[in-house]
Amino acid sequence: MVIKTLILRLLGLVLVVSLAWFWVMLSAAPAYAQAKTVNYTYSDVSDRDFSYTDLVGGVFAAAKMIGTNFQGANLSNSIFTKGMMLEANLSGANLTNSLLDRVTLNRANLTNAILTEATITSTTLYDAEITGADFTDAIIDRYQVSLMCQRASGVNPVTGISTRESLACPRK
């Protein structure tokens, strides 16, 4: 009698778990990619003109973007992991909440760019023009911040925040 009760309870448990699994599988909705999202992963878009383009959520992972023109483009929430952006023009671009991890931005033009809440880690910005760029609440390696503070100047015309203030540079 005890064994029969145990078997009935076990079968009941299996039935409940099976029904729960089927219910979850039948009610699950598929994940769709955003219709407007662009994906240039591993692409060579060097010298291309993306000026004043809406590229929100774009993916440029490991892309080669040497001399690419992103002037005034909306690149918020975009991914640039391991990208090569030598001498890229990002003047006036919106990179709010973007991920720039292990990106080469040497000699890039970031004049008046908005990089608020961006993650800029293991990224080099040697000789990048940052006049008027807003880095408010961005996560940036301390070493790069110290280098940028040596040349930081200007006020972003959109946000009204000075580059030195956004980088939390010490007073001169």
Image: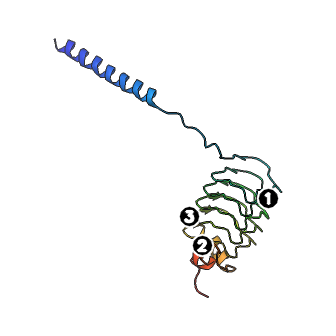
Numbered disc total: 3
Q: Residue pushed farthest right?
A: 47
The outermost residue toward the bottom is 172
- Name the residue tied to disc 3: 117
Q: In the figure, residue 8 lies in which quadrant?
A: top left
User: Residue type at mark 1?
Assistant: Thr
User: In the rendered structure, are the residues bearing label 1 and label 3 in contact, judged by CB atoms less than 8 Å apart?
Assistant: no
Which quarter of the rendered picture does the C terminus lie within?
bottom right
Q: Is residue 170 above or below residue 133?
A: below
Task: Say if residue 167 shows up in the picture.
Answer: no
Which mark is first along the chain, 3 or 1?
Answer: 1
Q: CA distance from mark 1 to mark 3?
A: 23 Å
Kindly report which numbered mark, 2 or 1, lies closer to the viewer in this rendering: 2
Label 2 element class: loop
43 shown above or below 65: above
Residue 91 location (% of width, % of height): 73, 68
Task: Identify the residue under disc 2.
Answer: 159
Instruction: Name the residue rendered at 71%, 63% in the picture.
Output: 72
Contact, mark 2 vs mark 1 (Cβ under 8 Å): no
Q: In the picture, residue 12 is in which quadrant? A: top left
Disc 3 marks which amino acid?
Glu
Query: As shown in the figure, which amino acid type bears the numbered disc 2?
Result: Thr
Q: Quadrant of the N terminus?
A: top left
Check residue 68 in the rendering and tell me which mark sits there, or answer none. Answer: 1
Separation of residues labelled 3 and 2 (CA atoms): 13 Å
Give the spatial CA distance, label 2 vs label 1.
25 Å
